[in-house]
Structure formats: C-alpha cells, structure tokens
Image (cartoon, helix red, strand yellow):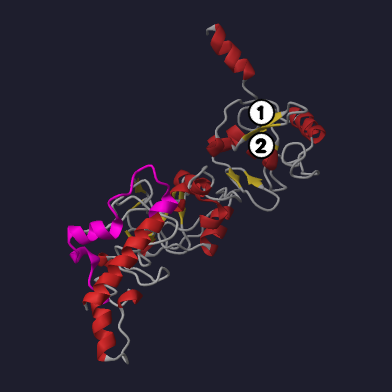
Amino acid sequence: MSNNRKRKALDDPVCILCGLSEDDEFKYGEMMMDAESEIAAHYYCLILSSGLWQKAKENEGLIGFRPEDIIKEVSRAYRLTCSFCKERGASIGCDIKSCRKIFHLPCALKNSCLLQFYGNYPSYCEQHRPQQAVGNSTVLNEAQQCIMCFDDIVPEATFCNLCTPCCFHWFHRHCLQKLALNFGLYFFRCPACNNKVDFQNEMLCMGIHIPQRDASWELEENAYEDLLQQYEHCDLEHCLCTHGRNFGSSKGRWKLVRCHCCGSAGAHVACARLRRKNDDWCCNDCQLFTPNQRKSTAIPKNSTPDEKSTQENEQTPRQTLDQQQVAEMNGCSTTDSETQEHVEIDDDLHWNRYRLRERRKD
C-alpha cells in the first residue's frame, strides 16, 4: 500500500466501540466525533450498547453520551467475547435475560440479529428475534414483486422480507430502510396504501430505523428557491409597451400583473386593459375553464344602455389600435437614457391625451 493510502487510513476516524472506520449511515449510522476528547463512534453503536446511557444534554459529548461513560463501556466490552467472531469488545447483548449471546454491531448485521430503534433500544439474537405474525390468506401466498425495486420477492416471513400490516404487501428490508432514512418520521408511510400509524409501529418492531428528522429533500440548501421567482413577461399577442415585453415598472400602466388563476402568464396593466390597477387578470388559457374570472371586463346587470355601450367600448382590446395610435400613446421621443420614473410619467400623459381625443370623437 502506498504512503498516501497509509496516511488516509490513519487519518480516518475509527469507531471506539466496533473498531471500524467505515462511514456507512445505512449500516452503522452516522460517524460522530467529539472534538474535545477526540472520541469517534457510530451512532448505532452508541445507542445500541447495553451498558451505555445518555446522561448529558444533546449538545454535550456525543449526542448526550459523556466521553467518560463511553470509555467505561469500552472497558466493559473488552472483557466480553463476541458469540459470532470470538473477538473481544462485544458491547451489544440479547435482550432476553436467559440468553447470553453478546455481539458486535457488524456481527449482528451479518447474522440476522434484530435491532430495535425505540424505547430502550433492545437487541435480539437470531433465535429470539420477534417474528411477523402473517396469516395464510391467498393474498399473502401469491407471488409478488417489491414495488420499490421491482424484484421478485418470496412471500415468506424471513429476516430479509417484511409484510405490511395494512395492505399485506411484501417488501425487502433494505428497501424499507432506505425509504425510512430518506423520508424521516413525518413522511414515512406505506408505499402501497399510504398508511402511517400501523405501518410505522410494525416497522419499528421489525427493526427499521425511522430517524426523527425532516425528509432528505427538505434538508437540501435552497431546495425551494425556484418558488420565490415571479413570472415577469407580457404574454398578450400585441404588447403595447415600446420598451419590450420584459419591461415592468413598480407602478403605473406598465406594471406587470400575473394571472390570478395559474400565475404562469403575465401582462401589462395597459395591455390587459385593466381599468383599475388592483383588478384581477385572467389569461386566455384559464378563461376557457373559468370565463367569469376577469373582473375588469364584467358589465353590471342594472346598468343603463349608454353605460353598457361605454363599457363594451372599453372592453375592446387595445390590440386593435393601429401603429400610429400606439406611437402617440407611448411617445416616440423617449430615449433610453431617461429614468424609469420619467418613462412612466410620459406614458401616462400620452395615454390620457389619447383617451381625451377618443371621447371627443364620440
């Protein structure tokens, strides 16, 4: 082995309880290390050790396990021999009082021992582990597939296969454990029927570790950053703004409003012909399903014929205006060097002049 590999092996933290440096959260839990005492241990090795208890706060030592208590547990385990590998340092014992089997965490995983992650965190050897009580119905005996990995699964109550108590579907143990680590306590449900209470209780009894934390997608940094972005583009066929469809002001006629139904389409206040700036606007796609959503175009039932004709004229889309009227409305003398505030003032002035000329013609 090269010098670089030797140096890397020496720098890797080694679990003081099982003697492994492997950092595999699926098998052994997170590798944790105390900066003051420089003691490293797997999370599962800490909580499953028979003679180790949390006597401090969560932010002290290793998640509440004091360094001096860990050293005492290592001394106790050194006097015990593992029932499987015959090596010293076994710290996990079978919870049955009449059973004298003691084992390391890696040995327990290799020999199908059941480790429970709730209450006092009891452990059971392969002979005394709890068994699933499944019936003899035709549904349970039919050949099935694990709907998580789509591999064939034998419908038998073994250590590697688990049956759900809610819908009687069979799953691989490692598939359910991966699901629990990703989903966390709140989101972990039956993949087949979405049951939560009965499913979680049964999985805890069968040795599935359900961490009390948020789901993995909730812990990602800036996971929902895209939801904070607002749509800013005028989607009407004929945009009247001479500054472009992407131009939007904080107020005035060129303020961009979004469809209040879907939020994925936008339009300028002037282009959408909104009489009031606080009116809701509905895009063409949403109007096909909700034709009465656009409040600004509604005509009161009790209005007079003159008022109706006036409102109908106002409802005429601005897209029907010719290019000369649009130029007069927006003002052709506006330069790119003018500030946004001046642009809004000039636009409003031209728009008011245009509406006065139209009313005089009528």
Q: Given contact means CB atoms under 8 Å apart, are the residues at marks 1 and 2 in contact?
A: yes
- Measured as percent of width and height from the top left, residue 5 is found at 54, 12
Is 234 rendered above or below residue 317? Answer: above
Which residue occupies 54% across, 45% down? 219
The residue type indicated by label 2 comes to Cys
Can residue 315 be seen from the camera position used here?
A: no
Q: Quadrant of the C terminus?
A: bottom left
Residue 2 lies left or right of residue 287; in this view the side is right
Q: Tell me the SS state at disc 2.
A: helix
81 part of magenta stretch: no
Which residue occupies 42% across, 52% down? 342
Q: Which residue is mark 1?
A: 15
338 part of magenta stretch: yes
Is 57 rendered above or below residue 301? Answer: above
Structural crowding at the residue carrying mark 2, measured as other residues with C-alpha within 10 Å and reported as few (<14), some (14–19) or many (≥20): many
Task: Quadrant for residue 50, please give it.
Answer: top right
Q: Tell me the SS state at disc 1.
A: loop
The residue type indicated by label 1 comes to Cys
Structural crowding at the residue carrying mark 1, measured as other residues with C-alpha within 10 Å and reported as few (<14), some (14–19) or many (≥20): many
Which residue occupies 70% across, 28% down? 16
Residue 265 lies left or right of residue 193; in this view the side is left
Can residue 166 be seen from the camera position used here?
A: yes
- Measured as percent of width and height from the top left, residue 192 is found at 40, 59
Residue 144 lies left or right of residue 320; in this view the side is right
Label annotation for residue 124: none
